Image: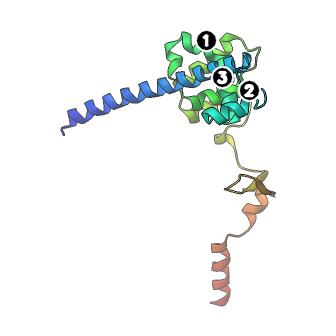
Amino acid sequence: MSKEEQVEQVFLLLEELRETLRTAALGFVDGGRILCEIQAKKLFPKDQGFYFFITDNVGLGRSTINDRMNAWKRFGTLILGNKEFQGIEPTKLRRLLPHVKHDSTDEVKEDLLYAAANLSVKDLQIWLMERAGQETPAGCNHSGWIEVIKICTKCRKILARAKDDLNEILERPTDAQEEKEEEAAIG
């Protein structure tokens, strides 16, 4: 395959991928619209409840249900009305949700959507942190406390939590340092 054929093939595959992502993004928001309608019209058995009914019939978990519904409520009409927003991946929409309140203006929502449409997931996360006045990863010196959580991989239950002072941990010698010190003392 020639270089030109490879470039053309990659271009076509990237276009196909963009269309797939656009479809996924629209499906995420439209799924939220459908979920909102089912909930608002109470189109589920009362003895099961909304979340159990959806999980049992569609396989969506509670947080996914909530994220889809919130994405529709907060961004639905803006996304449907602007083709540039229709390609925003569900991962990015989920990251935006905590930054939009029910009384946020459309202007604020559009600013968030423009950022999501034009930034990578990592850059969007940093931008959102800066916007919220939080320290960004680049500015973090990893001082203070760290938390270690042990979770059962089977049932996801938290088995143990421990907090350690990171500065104290960093001052401790590593196993390799201890071995060198022992070798130096013996040798």
Badge 1 element: helix
Task: State how far apart marks 3 and 2 are (Cα).
Answer: 14 Å
Q: Mark 1 points at which residue?
A: 77
Residue type, numbered disc 3: Leu
Comparing marks 3 and 2, which lies closer to the viewer? 2
- Which residue appears at 56% of the width and 33% of the height? 121
Residue 112, image x, y percentages: 63, 20
Q: Which of marks 2 and 1 is nearer the N terminus?
A: 2
| Image-quadrant location for residue 136 | top right
Badge 3 element: helix
Seen in the picture, residue 46 relative to 33 is either above or below; the reply is: below
Residue 138, image x, y percentages: 64, 41
Residue type, numbered disc 1: Thr
Which of the two residues, 182 or 101, is positioned nearer the viewer here? 101
Split into 4 quadrants, where in the image is the N terminus?
top left
Split into 4 quadrants, where in the image is the C terminus?
bottom right
Residue type, numbered disc 2: Pro
- Which residue appears at 70% of the width and 20% of the height? 43
Comparing marks 2 and 1, which lies closer to the viewer? 2
Residue 55, image x, y percentages: 66, 35
Q: Mark 2 points at which residue?
A: 45
Which of the two residues, 69 or 82, is positioned nearer the viewer here? 69
| Image-quadrant location for residue 128 | top right
Q: Badge 1, how many Cα within 10 Å: few under 14, some, many 20+?
A: few
Q: Is residue 173 in view?
A: yes
| Image-quadrant location for residue 58 | top right
Image disc number at residue 35: 3
Comparing marks 1 and 3, which lies closer to the viewer? 3
